[in-house]
Image (cartoon, grey):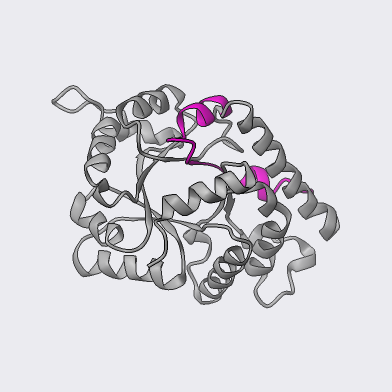
Amino acid sequence: MSDPFFDRLAARVEAVDSVVSVGIDPRLDRTPSFLADHDLPRWAFARRVIDATHTHAAAVKPNAAFFEDADGWRALRETIAYAHGKDLPVVLDAKRGDVGPTARQYAQNVADIGADAVTVSPYMGRDSVEPFLAQDLGVFVLCRTSNAGGADLQDRDLVTGEPVYERVAALADLWNDRENVGLVVGATAPAELEAIREAVPDLPFLVPGVGAQGGAVEAAAEFGLADGVGLVNSSRGIIYAGDEHDAERPYFAAAGTAAKRLKRRLNEYR
């Protein structure tokens, strides 16, 4: 068994002085024209993004939704292997959550494809998350997400008076007996981000929303980290920073510049 995920992540954060997670969401309808004829355009795109950003990134976060077809899974496997070749941990953004054999199979799929960590939904309770906890994986539990609709359920008060997101955070803390649990908490809800950090001071966060969604960079850096460990993710704000009319080199150079800029901004507040 390898070192625990969050130990590996801590080493990577220290090595590159960065908590930036680069989200890899390769939309086929946005594939640059110079990659359109590649046999695996999503893999070609992801590889070039990794080449451009890896010196500024603590991890990469491919989103499973953009890979869930035959060619896509091939591209995802190549992307994960290539990221590992650059010493980058890989968080598979899959948001899985089910029970019984289904959950076990989901967890096995994540492990088999080589991801180091995964995002999961806690809505069905611990038995839907346990198969992931039992793998040699980091497990980021959805808590207070960055989308506007997250408030529809996550901000609702329970009969105990606590909001749903605080209950999720408390449960995740209880589930952390293997020390492989973190939370997904969006930078678009900075007050909730601060409250959740106060409630669970020892859990690392994966903080989305600082790029195209306009989340609070200062709050992400101040409250997203536990003992300096955590991830702040930007996807579209980095990977699509280039102009689609640019040639290949300047197009991906723009992704590298965006990752470097976010790293510097976050480091101002770490």
- Which residue corresponds to the image point at 75% horizontal and 60% vertical from the top-left? 32
In the depicted view, which residue is nearer to us: 142 or 259? 259
**Residue 234 visible, this orientation:** no
Residue 47 among magenta residues: no
Residues in magenta, as a range: 217-243
Q: Is residue 6 left or right of residue 238?
A: left
In the depicted view, which residue is nearer to us: 226 or 244? 226
Q: Measuring from the top left, give residue 53's x and y in whole percent.
A: 69, 52
Q: Measuring from the top left, give residue 164's x and y in whole percent.
A: 25, 32
Q: Measuring from the top left, give residue 132's x and y in whole percent.
A: 30, 60
- Which residue corresponds to the image point at 62% horizontal and 32% vertical from the top-left? 267
Question: What is the number of callouts on the image?
Answer: 0
In the depicted view, which residue is nearer to us: 125 or 38? 125
**Residue 198 is drawn in which quadrant?**
top left
Say if 32 sits above or below 148 in the image: below
- Which residue corresponds to the image point at 20% horizontal and 51% vertical from the top-left? 126
Residue 231 among magenta residues: yes
**Residue 262 is drawn in which quadrant?**
top right
Say if 236 sits above or below 104 in the image: above
- Which residue corresponds to the image point at 30% horizontal and 27% vertical from the top-left? 199
Q: Quadrant of the C terminus?
A: top right
